[in-house]
Amino acid sequence: MGKKRSRDGEDCAVDRQPKKMEPSLIKNKIKRSMLHAKLKQEKKVDKKSRIKSRDAVEKRALELGEEPPKPKVPRTIENTREADETVCQPDDEELFADNAADEFSAHFSHVQNPKILITSSRFHSTRGNQLIEELLSVIPNAHYYKRGTYELKKIVEYAKSRDFTFIIVIHQNRREPNGMLFINLPDGPTAHFNLSSLVLRKDIKNHGRPTSHQPELILNNFSTRLGHRIGRMIASVFPHDPNFRGRRVVTFHNQRDFIFFRHHRYIFETKDLNGGKPKEKATEDGKKQQKETVIARLQECGPRFTLKLLSLQHGTFDTKGGEYEWVHKPDMDTSRRRFFL
């Protein structure tokens, strides 16, 4: 009599099925590269077939008058970020109450106009001076004072007595600007940023020269309570009545806790839709009219740099007795999907 096939035998039969070989398990370099090329080609063919079938389904839905399937949204670090309970909501009454009572409320209620003092570290360099010169052309009503040997606390007291509303200090290391300190006057707060990826105006190809018009300000993606506070702090540097005739715009774009600074001029132009061959259409009175659209062109004026928040301190600059609202620590960088601004 034949014996019954054990379940162990069935498991062995399943295990004997051919498995997909991984190129990393092959020691021979030639065979490994050939298998890698084969798998890459199969992946490419599979992708093309999926695109072709998706287009066919969409075309058939349009022919039948149905709504085509929604396109898939790619997974990015931004849309898969960790949940944060401090993200600002549009109907947050507590946030509105804090805005009305914070240190920047006088600026946003047009009680005082911004007056900025810009200085450097004690040991400044050529690139640092060039950055300060370009910041003077970007920020309206900004004044440069040479640092000399004065301590920063004395500079803060001097700026208070001269009715300055903000201090910007450019830190430098090895003849290269590497930090920026923002001090709101008279009661703070103080923000310390790391500065990187500096490109001066003369190094930008086809750069423009800014005019003396007051620029427009764009603050993008400051979504948390901390980011909202930093955004209000940056906004208090610029006046709230931009001159649109100058067509200048200053942008602070936050992405993954890196704040990208850009300075542009823009212009609106009309462009033919058919690549230089405008399509003419007849109007009611029999005349032919060219089909055109309005586009916007940008010209970068510089400088260009990136900021990353290191600390936010209550009050004005005080390294010994100051109380910090937020400090960046190395253990905060354990996840790529955790953002604070």
Image: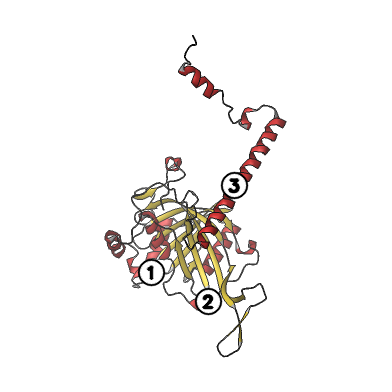
Q: Is residue 324 visible in this depiction of the protein?
A: yes
Near-viewer residue (48 or 56):
56
Task: State the CA–CA distance, disc 3 to disc 2.
Answer: 49 Å
Ranked by sequence position, the earlier of labels 3 and 1 is 3
Q: Residues within 10 Å of mark 2 (few under 14, many from 20)?
A: some
Q: Residue at x 55, y 88 (%)?
A: 284
Near-viewer residue (160 or 86):
86
Q: Residues within 10 Å of mark 3 (few under 14, many from 20)?
A: few
Q: Secondary structure at mark 1?
A: loop
Q: Which color scheme is applied?
A: secondary structure
- Residue farthest along the bottom direction in this orientation: 285
The disc label shown at residue 163, or none = 1
Indicate the position of residue 326 as horizontal and vertical percent values. 37, 49
Task: State the CA–CA distance, disc 2 to disc 1.
Answer: 28 Å
40 with respect to 179 (left or right)? right
Indicate the position of residue 50 as horizontal and vertical percent values. 57, 48
Q: Residues within 10 Å of mark 1 (few under 14, many from 20)?
A: some
Task: State the CA–CA distance, disc 3 to disc 1.
Answer: 64 Å
61 with respect to 105 (left or right)? right
Near-viewer residue (257 or 310):
257
The disc label shown at residue 246, or none = 2
Indicate the position of residue 17 as horizontal and vertical percent values. 56, 26
Mark in the foreground, 3 or 2: 3
